[in-house]
Amino acid sequence: MLPTLIVIIAIVIVIVQWIISTQRRLVVLDENISNAMCQVGVQLSSRLDALTALLDLTKGFAKHESEMLIEIIRSRRSVITAKSTPEDVLRQEGVISEALGRIAMVTVQYPELKAEQTYIKTMDAVQIFENMVRTSRLIYNDSVTKLNREIRMFPVTIIAGMLGFRQRDYLEELAGKTDMPCDGRWV
């Protein structure tokens, strides 16, 4: 009777340790996703700041267009946090794409703007932040893959469901984003 009780207790202890270990692993994976989403938010915010600075430069050429676009950016801008969804990120990228499109129209109307050093430097900064967003997006999607893969495997799927962990969505590329400039300058 005693050896059977010891075996049962040992099995229960092993199961409890496995559950605790699984929960901790899922928490780490979930936190990695939250951290990656925050990084995406920081990069998008920095990119919007650079775009706003770029729009300030265009005021001398197309004052009404620049002021209107700055107001649009301010009104549609939202903070991307750990709790944000991929849809929130896509909305922010839509605002950025719209702003870049309008800046492109201004530079077509005023080609001398593209030759200004401040414009070139600011556009380079916009491109640097775009590259950082891409890197952050890759990290986010990699983190999502790891969590989703873990959650889908038996028997972890049972524990994940009981503890409230769920699969997360990936960050998709914004449609038409491939039309953006690669070298930071409009041609």
Image (tube, rainbow, N blue to C red):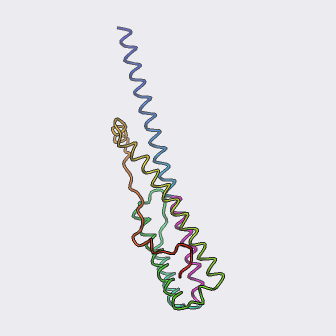
The residue that appears at 39% across and 23% down in the rendered structure is 12
Q: Is residue 109 above or below residue 179?
A: below
The part of the image, by quadrant, that contains residue 163 is top left
At horizontal 37% and vertical 13% (from top left) the residue drawn is 5
Predominant SS of the magenta segment: helix
Q: Is-magenta flag for residue 41?
A: yes
Residue under the image location 36 percent in, 48 percent down: 166
Residue 49, position as x, y percentages in the image: 57, 73
Up the image or down, 152 lies above or below 121; here it is above
Boundaries of the magenta span: 38-59
In the rendered picture of this protein, how many numbered marks are placed on residues? Answer: 0
Q: Quadrant of the N terminus?
A: top left
In the image, residue 147 lies at what x, y percent? 42, 46
Name the one closer to the observer, 98 or 138.
Answer: 138
Instruction: Please provide percent x and percent y for residue 57.
Output: 60, 84
Q: Looking at the picture, does residue 39 appear above or below residue 92? A: above
**Residue occupying image coordinates x 50% and y 83%:** 104
Residue 23 % position (x, y): 43, 38
Between 15 and 150, the one nearer to me in the picture? 150
Residue 8 lies in quadrant: top left
Q: Residue furthest right?
A: 117
Quick one: 101 or 56, which is closer to the camera?
101
Locate residue 5 relative to residue 139 in the image: left or right: left
Which image quadrant for residue 85? Answer: bottom left
Q: Is residue 52 magenta?
A: yes
